[in-house]
Image (tube, rainbow, N blue to C red):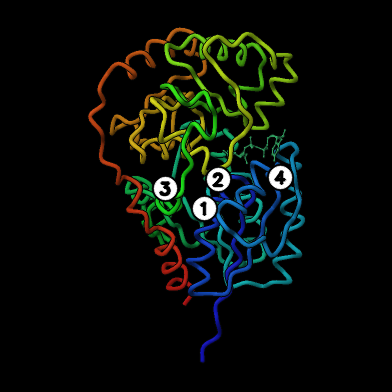
């Protein structure tokens, strides 16, 4: 009998824990899986609650790296991954997305000559110095199996990495969403403010929350939107509000609620008239759920959502002049719906598992 393949599945932030939940069972059907949580996200709503909601067993190894500067965080992951991988000696290391955990784990594996599988490979933004862009380009350049969410990512990697195996699997985030839809709570159970039409908002990126005047201006614009906005606070945004003394600033039509769990976030998105975000995950969840999205960034890696008319960009520097009119137009216009299959059919995790096993054999 042939030896069972062994894959170390590495993750560490909220969106990765969500995707790892389904990858772990898909890979586990074909190989031995060791789950490694870097601990980049550790707050209850960002981490523990997810394990509970998605019914995931605790990770086999928890590295506890926590927060820090990019260098501190990435270096801590490298330092803790190297001895662990040396001891585990897996046949492959699977990493997801574009966070510091993705890069740290991929780099530690590649330096030990352990084959790397990159899930959610081939996405690109124009800003090459954005932390996530550095992480994803570097990971794409050292992985041997590149699992892509879309045709455009596949085409790009076939040019960039003719030496690697590129497999168009679709987006595992859709698999998780599809599996969780039947059990979602009602929006009103998440926030009483969700009993009338509302906009659901989240934002946490440095360019929106780290400068107090930008954050203040954004909150002012949001509080003047024509439909009440429910803003779920990422811990980073909560800290920024506290640090800038904005915790109790005038809110008008806006209501702030603490960070919500994954199921609550899906429920709030599904019930919303519009989603306002800077999160890549929420852009796609709104797209799959048929809810118009406004993304508070100058660009998105998820181009197809723009091309299909599901998503509209408002760059942080244009919030003052554009946010109100864009939101007003989207709320008034009857949107015709869009093709929801740009990122696969909801069976991506099984394809990642099949591709990994085929590649290793
Ligand atoms: C990280 C990812 C980003 C992803 C996001 C998902 C990188 C470079 N960025 O951003 O791509 O979209 O996760 O949420 O890896 N904090 C807490 N509690 C936590 C974790 C963080 O309070 O459990 C606060 C800390 O103040 C920390 C800050 O959030 O310094 C930033 O956390 P970090 O993990 O560096 O990046 P995110 O902004 O969460």
Please indicate whether residue 344 sits to the left or right of residue 200 in the image.
left
The vertical placement of 254 against 349, above or below, is: above
* First of labels 3, 4 by sequence position: 4
Tag 4 near tag 1, CB within 8 Å: no
The vertical placement of 46 against 268, above or below, is: below
* First of labels 2, 4 by sequence position: 2
Please indicate whether residue 236 sits to the left or right of residue 271 in the image.
right
Q: Which mark is residue 181?
A: 3
The Cα atoms of the two marked residues, 3 and 2, are separated by 17 Å
Residue behind label 4 places its C-beta within 8 angstroms of ligand 1 = yes
Q: Which residue is mark 1?
A: 19
Please indicate whether residue 224 sits to the left or right of residue 57 in the image.
left
Q: Which residue is mark 2?
A: 15
The vertical placement of 326 against 262, above or below, is: above
- Quadrant in the picture for residue 45: top right
Q: Residues within 10 Å of mark 3 (few under 14, many from 20)?
A: some
Q: Quadrant of ligand 1?
A: top right
Q: Which residue is mark 4?
A: 42
Residue behind label 2 places its C-beta within 8 angstroms of ligand 1 = yes
The Cα atoms of the two marked residues, 2 and 4, are separated by 13 Å
- Quadrant in the picture for residue 46: top right
The Cα atoms of the two marked residues, 1 and 3, are separated by 15 Å
Q: Residues within 10 Å of mark 1 (few under 14, many from 20)?
A: many
């Amino acid at each position: 009998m042939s030896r069972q393949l062994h894959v170390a599945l590495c993750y560490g932030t909220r969106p990765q824990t969500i995707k790892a939940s389904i990858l772990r069972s898909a890979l586990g059907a074909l190989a031995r899986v060791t789950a490694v949580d870097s601990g980049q996200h550790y707050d209850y709503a960002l981490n523990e609650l997810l394990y509970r909601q998605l019914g995931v067993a605790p990770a086999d190894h928890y590295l506890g790296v926590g927060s820090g500067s990019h260098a501190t965080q990435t270096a801590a992951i490298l330092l803790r991954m190297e001895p662990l991988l040396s001891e585990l000696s897996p046949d492959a290391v699977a990493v997801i997305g574009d966070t510091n955990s993705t890069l740290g784990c991929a780099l530690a594996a590649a330096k030990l000559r352990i084959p790397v599988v990159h899930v959610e490979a081939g996405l690109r933004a124009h800003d090459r110095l954005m932390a996530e862009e550095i992480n994803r380009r570097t990971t794409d350049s050292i992985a041997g199996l590149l699992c892509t969410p879309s045709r455009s990512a596949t085409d790009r990697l076939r040019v960039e990495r003719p030496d690697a195996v590129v497999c168009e699997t679709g987006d595992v985030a859709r698999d998780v969403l599809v599996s969780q839809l039947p059990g979602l709570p009602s929006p009103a159970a998440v926030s009483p403010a969700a009993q009338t039409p509302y906009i659901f908002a989240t934002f946490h990126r440095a360019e929106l929350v780290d400068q107090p005047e930008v954050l203040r201006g954004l909150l002012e614009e949001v509080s003047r939107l024509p439909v009440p906005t429910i803003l779920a606070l990422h811990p980073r945004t909560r800290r920024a509000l506290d640090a800038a003394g904005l915790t109790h600033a005038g809110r008008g039509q806006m209501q702030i609620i603490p960070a919500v769990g994954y199921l609550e976030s899906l429920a709030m998105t599904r019930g919303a008239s519009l989603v306002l975000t800077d999160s890549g995950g929420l852009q796609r969840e709104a797209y799959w759920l048929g809810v118009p999205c406004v993304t508070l960034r100058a660009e998105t890696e998820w181009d197809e959502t723009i091309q299909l008319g599901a998503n509209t960009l408002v760059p942080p520097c244009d919030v003052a002049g554009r946010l109100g009119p864009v939101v007003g137009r989207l709320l008034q216009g009857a949107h015709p719906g869009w093709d929801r299959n740009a990122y696969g059919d909801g069976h991506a995790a099984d394809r990642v598992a099949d591709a990994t096993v085929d590649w290793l054999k």
